[in-house]
């Protein structure tokens, strides 16, 4: 599996846009965008990426949630590459298929599981690959450094589910990934959440 951040050097306010490809660009691999952001330079980056002979450059898009900085470029992505678009929210224009907690999808050459994580938004999801020990988090607040906020019970349950996974890398919707001590950081977050108000 290869993971490219297409908006790492952007000058526009946007989410990270991750392009997930198979290690060898083989025909069965599913070229996947996780979020589309709002910087049109991502389209140029896709066009200049080796995505495999005889394959669509972008076969599918999955949105971690529907906020504009993650989904704003969707109309241009759809008109340029004609991908199938997945999301949790049925209210976002351009979505072809809905996903639910526990669904599995192929990104590149790896299987990912959808984890519904309501909190940042009602339609927020994380995406987990057991084989690679990778989690794409979108804007789900996974690093919580102190107790005190109020959290929905559904978010706490989702965080508990994430903490049961073996995670070596977390890719966030903004900023750099975490590649060390993911499990201990997540457990610390869960402890802080449990000390906070839960409704």
Image (spheres, rainbow, N blue to C red):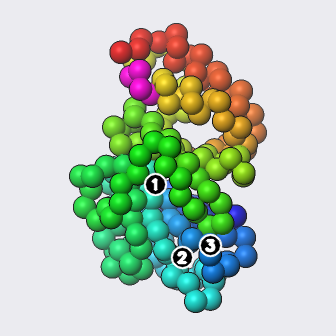
Q: CA distance from mark 2 to mark 3?
A: 19 Å
Give the number of the mark in front: 2 or 3.
3
| Vertical position of residue 121 compared to residue 154: above or below | below
Q: Is residue 152 located in the magenta-colored stretch of the structure?
A: yes
Q: Can I make out residue 48 in this image?
A: yes
Q: According to the image, label 3 marks what residue?
A: 29
Which sits earlier in the primary sequence, circle 2 or circle 3? Answer: 3
Residue where numbered disc 2 is placed = 45
Magenta segment includes 63: no
**Foreground residue, 130 or 181?**
130
Q: Is residue 42 above or below residue 92?
A: below
**Left or right for 82, reference 59:** left
Residue for point 49% across, 74% down: 59
In percent of width and height, residue 74 lies at: 35, 66
User: Pointer 1: what residue?
Assistant: 15
User: Could you tell which of marks 1 and 3 lies nearer the N-terminus?
Assistant: 1
Residue at point 67%, 70% (across, down) = 22
Q: Which residues are magenta?
A: 151-155
| Residue 196 falls left or right of residue 106 | left
Q: Secondary structure at mark 1?
A: loop
| Residue located at (40% from left, 59% from top) | 86
- On-image quarter of the N terminus: bottom right
Alpha carbons under labels 1 and 3: distance apart: 25 Å
Name the secondary structure under disc 3.
loop
């Amino acid at each position: 599996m290869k993971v490219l951040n297409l908006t790492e050097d952007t000058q526009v306010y946007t989410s990270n846009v991750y392009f997930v490809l198979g290690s060898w660009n083989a025909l069965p691999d599913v070229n996947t965008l996780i979020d589309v952001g709002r910087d049109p330079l991502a389209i140029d980056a896709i066009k200049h990426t080796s995505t495999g002979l005889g394959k669509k450059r972008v076969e599918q898009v999955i949105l971690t949630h529907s906020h504009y900085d993650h989904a704003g470029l969707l109309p241009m992505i759809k008109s340029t590459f004609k991908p199938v678009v997945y999301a949790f929210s049925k209210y976002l224009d351009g979505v072809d298929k809905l996903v639910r907690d526990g669904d599995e999808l192929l990104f590149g050459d790896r299987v990912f599981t959808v984890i519904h994580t309501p909190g940042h938004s009602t339609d927020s999801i994380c995406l987990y690959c057991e084989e690679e020990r990778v989690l794409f988090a979108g804007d789900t607040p996974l690093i919580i450094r102190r107790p005190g906020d109020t959290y929905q019970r559904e978010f706490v349950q989702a965080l508990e589910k994430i903490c049961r996974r073996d995670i070596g890398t977390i890719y966030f919707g903004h900023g750099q990934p975490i590649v060390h001590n993911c499990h201990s950081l997540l457990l610390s977050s869960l402890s802080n959440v449990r000390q906070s108000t839960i409704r």
